[in-house]
Amino acid sequence: MEINQQTSENAEIVRGITIRTVLNLYGGFAVFGLILSIFTTPISLNENMRLFYNEDLMMEAKKIKEFLFFIFGSALVYFSLLNLYYKYMK
């Protein structure tokens, strides 16, 4: 039984997914999900378990604008802090 040892000369360097990449993807999906929630909140179930669009639950234009400011402001803070941390702390 032989042991096949790799030396540094013939070993391939494989770059995997980093924590920074995962956190950036998570942030992107979170922002996308929050934006999508604006349009999916009015979708409800009735007594017969059928989907219907309840226009009473739709946010007003002013509330949508405030929510979008919150989402993009939070995203700006999140991505800035995340990328600054990995730029200066690593």
Image (spheres, rainbow, N blue to C red):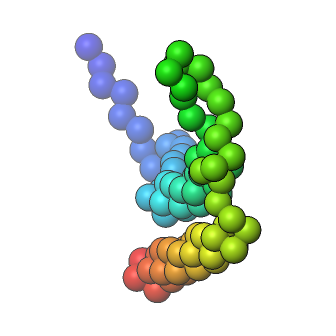
| Nearer-the-camera pick, 66 or 69 | 66
Q: Is residue 20 left or right of residue 68?
A: left
Q: Is residue 48 above or below residue 41?
A: above
Image quarter of the N terminus: top left
Q: Quadrant of residue 30?
A: bottom right
Q: Is residue 53 left or right of residue 7?
A: right
| Nearer-the-camera pick, 4 or 62 | 62
Res 83 seen here: no
Q: Is residue 87 above or below residue 13?
A: below
Res 34 seen here: yes
Residue at 62% x, 44% y is 42
Q: Which residue extends farthest left?
A: 1
User: Residue 4's spot in the image, x, y percent?
Assistant: 36, 27
User: Residue 14's spot in the image, x, y percent?
Assistant: 54, 46
Residue at 40% x, 82% y is 89
Q: Is residue 68 above or below residue 2?
A: below
Residue at 63% x, 76% y is 66
Residue at 63% x, 70% y is 63
User: Residue 38's spot in the image, x, y percent?
Assistant: 64, 55
| Nearer-the-camera pick, 50 or 86 | 50
Q: Which residue extends farthest right?
A: 61
Image quarter of the C terminus: bottom left
Q: Quadrant of residue 12?
A: top right
Q: Is residue 64 above or below residue 86?
A: above
